[in-house]
Image: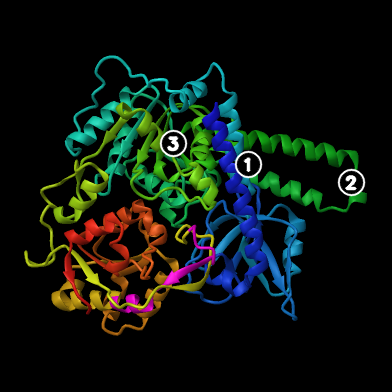
Amino acid sequence: MPSLLRQRELLRLEYEYEKAAYRREVEASGVERRVKRGDAWFPVNVGRHYYNSLDRLVVEITRSEEEETEHNFEYGRSVCFFGVDGSGMLRFCRFAAVVSYAEEHRMVVALPDEAALSELNALERPGVALHFDETTYRLMFEALDKVLMAKDNRLETLRNIVHVGRKPEWSAGSHLPPHLPWLNAAQASAVADVLRARDVLVVHGPPGTGKTTTLVEAVCEVLRREPQVLVCAQSNTAVDWITGQLADRGVAVLRMGNPTRVTDKMLANTYERRFEAHPDYPALWAIRRSIRQLYATPRKGRSESFHQKIARLRERADELELRIRHSLFDGARVIASTLAGAAHPLLTGHHFHTLFIDEAAQALEAACWIAMAKADRVILAGDHCQLPPTVKSVEAMRGGLGTTLMETLAQRHPEAVRLLTMQYRMNETLMRFSSEWFYDGKLVAAPEVKHRSLLDEMDWPLVWVEAEGVLPESPADVPNGLSETEHEETTGRSLTNRSEALRTLSALRAYVERIGRRRLLEERVDFGIISPYRAQVQLLRSLLRNDEYLRPLRKSITVNTVDAFQGQERDVVVVSLVRANEQGNIGFLNDLRRMNVAMTRAKMKLILVGDAETLCRHKFYATLHSRCHIEQRM
């Protein structure tokens, strides 16, 4: 299977590149720099420790200082602890730990054992940082090996459909779902074909076309015919979103792992919370406590009866734990996890007829196979014309590691793709360019959004604020490693453009003045300020904090990267494009899928701020520029 062997080799290149980059970063980056980019907390307070409901030793960690930087800690990520002595020397702990869940200034971390806790408590001025995570790579390598060796089973069939050219099969006869008047024709057709597909189906959902709505209906219809399904996504955030939507429909969802947003509503669906709420849990907790108390006795006082008692207690604990586990899984209609989370030990031995993968266009193919090994058929939903998966190795990217399973299926089996065509987000003018460039002009604006606007017809929805003479972009002191940072930049630093950032806020102020702050507040109009570069985002946030005119609207203004805005929408969006240089180098803005995301977040007004002389040497930006109302320097 040459294509899969090639995938494995490219994945190895990415693994080696990322591991080496992590080592270089740790050696070269100071603590302050890692804190600034959200990859470390320092200093921290080590709080209480306890055994959680899954019998894992966990410890609470809080930031000692109120940092405004958004951090990158979330459930499942590997972390390491370090201390800084009086001379400023760093000393790293010998163990790795795993984030159980993380809030803005507090996280709970699972430790390997009590010896790790002792080592942590002995640290002078402790801190915590993200650690290179071997686990996900190991799971992906194992998944590819399993696919390569698959024979005479469903995994072999799915492999041959993706890589050999075997045609997907369909059930005979009509399988139209019950009347669903809240779906449009394309959505209803996609749901019907989900029921017909025996092997694979791709639900292609461009921005604003109700992909999640369609997916939720498809899951509900499949559950009328099957007892249980597996629902996965690449990120915890995407799993949280689909879990919440299904739970709101009254579907019994069991969320493996903890959510990104730690709220009571989200936690209520997690395996851990359900486990500790089970009627048998108090008895299990009491037995576990007894076992720990017995082990706390001096070794010299342990007789043979001690070991017999331990064995009896462990047997009873295992029996109760297994009973609780079966109860939770039997009562769930949907099991939800990240793609890597599908390899959770609790899911060992579980097999599903149907697997749904949401946001499939953001997942590496190898990650998808982790979950697909547990299913007979797979429904992939997403949009391969939006954000791709993160690949940091230039060699691996050029070799095709960034080509997703969804893309491969769409190219090899277009008959298995269902495009959603009615969009409900954007004014028709905002939609048209994206539709023509990325979706063959097939998108149609729903009547209720077609002419949506904050002002009258004189307010052109698509505006380009010219940035002639703007100062060239410059490297900012932000280390590489984030998906927003250009792969080809060897400086390892993100970019800023201060004069363009000032102009971006100036453009927003001018529009606010035109409409009126009072009206915007009364109507709760929200704004997004987007830049492809993380350093420019940090600069824009700093400028916004000091802008007195926009202060009353600050709660309704979100400033973030393109990646962070995926899946979101705002009434008004301003995009700072940053690039300005004599060479016409636009870096990773050449990835037009990223721009597709940035342009399609706005519902009523999109303002692009950029240096046309630099950007319009590229056909995409030249065409986009020609569609915009042009405003000269402000």
Indicate the amino acid at tag 2: Arg
CA–CA distance between discs 1 and 3? 19 Å
User: Residue farthest to the right?
Assistant: 300
Residue 405: which disc? 3
Residue 277 or 576: which is nearer the viewer?
576
Q: Residues within 10 Å of mark 2 (few under 14, many from 20)?
A: few
The vertical placement of 443 against 125, above or below, is above
Q: Is residue 93 visible?
A: yes
- Looking at marks 2 and 1 on the same chain, the residue that comes earlier in the sequence is marked by 1
Indicate the amino acid at tag 3: Leu
Q: Write the start and end of the magenta stretch as one range.
A: 487-503
Residue depicted at x 51% and y 29% = 374
Q: Residues within 10 Å of mark 1 (few under 14, many from 20)?
A: few
- Looking at marks 1 and 3 on the same chain, the residue that comes earlier in the sequence is marked by 1
Q: Quadrant of residue 79?
A: bottom right
Residue depicted at x 31% and y 29% = 414
Q: Which quadrant would the C terminus be assigned to in this image?
A: bottom left
Residue depicted at x 35% and y 58% = 565
SS state under label 2: loop
SS state under label 1: helix
Indicate the amino acid at tag 1: Arg
Instruction: Measuring from the top left, give residue 28's x and y in whole percent.
Output: 65, 69
CA–CA distance between discs 2 and 1? 40 Å
Residue depicted at x 50% and y 41% = 339
User: Residue farthest to the left?
Assistant: 457
Residue identified by numbered label 1: 138
Residue 366 or 107: which is nearer the viewer?
366
Residue identified by numbered label 2: 302
Q: Residues within 10 Å of mark 3 (few under 14, many from 20)?
A: many
Q: From the viewer's perspective, is 204 left or right of 228?
A: left
